[in-house]
Amino acid sequence: MVSPVAYILIPAALVLFFRGRRALLWATLLLVPFFGVGVVDLGVTSIAGFQLFGVLFIARCMVDDIWSTTGGLKPSRANAVAAFFLFLCFASLSMAVLNAGAVEVYTETKGRWIEVVRNSVPLRLSVFNFTQILYPIFGVLLFHFVVRELRSLSDLRKAINILVWGALAIAVMSIGSGVLYTTGQGELYRQILGLFSIGPFGDKGPQSASFGRFFRMYTLAGEPGFTALTLLVGTGLVGGSVLQKGISPVRWPIAKFSVILVALLLNGSTTAYFGAVVFITWVPIVLWYTGETSLSSVLRPLVYVFGGVVLLGGLASTVQVSGAPFHEWLINYHLAKFQGEAGSGQIRAYVAWYSLREVFLTSPILGVGYGSHLSLSLVTFLLSNVGLLGFGAFLAFFYTVLRNTKRTVQNARGPLRGMAFIGALTLPPFLATLFVAKATSGMNMGLTWTIIALAEATYQVYRRDQTHSTAQV
């Protein structure tokens, strides 16, 4: 099965493949925020728009490397750690054979998560393992080639703005769809979404509030949780531009930040509100971590945060969602859900505890094999599937990139310093939210690898500039 938009995307991707890897790079980044745009269902797996262009981008880079005989892997610690993580993913598959039948695992099952839990199967190596491991392979290769292709300040600026405009498009879609549902045009919106999906989009109607139906909207980024992650990335990219006034790579950052923030608050998912809390908490920490310790640099974001919380708190007190005041809705639904006492929180808590108590302890060092067991948080997914070694390697990969970004912020000057700060501000809250709120999908999202690549690319540009300056001297 193919989506209607596939008849445009597939020919466009093939044309760009022959035009060159740079055209494919920008097309891939353009589609990365739109996780819900599908292209084709192959039976064993489905291909999203960013994956189609990303695979062709990777393939074209490899072809160019072979043709020129001057390409190949460039030495960097981040590449080495990423490759080691991928090696451990493959090595973990041996555990699915050695521990076959030792534990019941949750694997591919159609329907809701309660059906997945009810249809657990004995651990074994299957085709599903190999289709799932394609995602980290794709992610690591995408990370490597995106970092390599973002070679200059202009490349970094263009990449940041492409992602910002993608997040802004999702924000406008979220707000606009609420207008359509409120005015009784919800069916029109579902038809629009259907143009970009393989089969029916499967969206659910938004929740009603005292000012219309704006909460929990589906967009081309996916269901509300995935939409929230895209908006969270946009918040970081534009928020970093607001905090770095004078060297911002984003034009009109305050206006764009306001639109994205409104969409994030109206998103209505627990992922959105958890991510927002993590982001607000990280702002003063990242200022200290990167050495931005001057009084003005610390006070300015705190004033923004405090003023925003007071303003939004006052507005929220007047809003009702699903018949309850906003603050009661947050406490009775989202906080209870996060504590495992309401909604999907109950099944999430059960799956997480089972993954740690039963599956992880079956093979704590190397896991039960990548893709053998599905969970509902990235932490429990990685621990149970690739064990302490694999999870540790992924954390080392993240830490290496974050440390490199910190070095760039502390040592670079001008726009490059501002771009590195944006990476340091955006990356930790995004990954922390993935660790808690998403599992295998966190590894499958193009945003995951793209944001890590964007942060690392600032360091590689800095290192290249330093090498060039030294050579000139």
Image (cartoon, grey):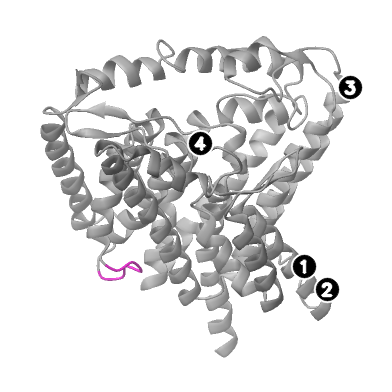
Dot 3 corresponds to which residue?
Answer: 98
Mark nearer the N terminus (2 vs 3): 2
Dot 1 corresponds to which residue?
Answer: 62
Mark nearer the N terminus (4 vs 1): 1
- Secondary structure type for disc 1: helix
> In 3D space, how far apart are the residues under numbered discs 1 and 2 (Cα atoms)?
6 Å
The residue carrying pointer 2 sits among few (fewer than 14), some (14 to 19) or many (20 or more) residues within 10 Å by Cα, namely: few
Dot 4 corresponds to which residue?
Answer: 434
The residue carrying pointer 3 sits among few (fewer than 14), some (14 to 19) or many (20 or more) residues within 10 Å by Cα, namely: some
Report the residue that reaches farthest toward the bottom. Answer: 472
- Secondary structure type for disc 4: helix
Does residue 243 appear left or right of residue 150 in this picture? left
Nearer the camera: disc 3 or disc 1: 1
Say if mark 4 contacts mark 1, CB within 8 Å: no
Nearer the camera: disc 2 or disc 3: 2
Does residue 415 appear left or right of residue 96 in this picture? left
Mark nearer the N terminus (3 vs 1): 1
Say if mark 3 contacts mark 1, CB within 8 Å: no
Q: Amino acid at mark 3?
A: Leu
The x, y position of residue 226, in whole percent, is 47, 39
Q: How many marks?
A: 4
What residue do we see at 55% from left, 37% from top? 200
Say if mark 3 contacts mark 4, CB within 8 Å: no
Residue segment shown in magenta: 246-251
Nearer the camera: disc 3 or disc 4: 4
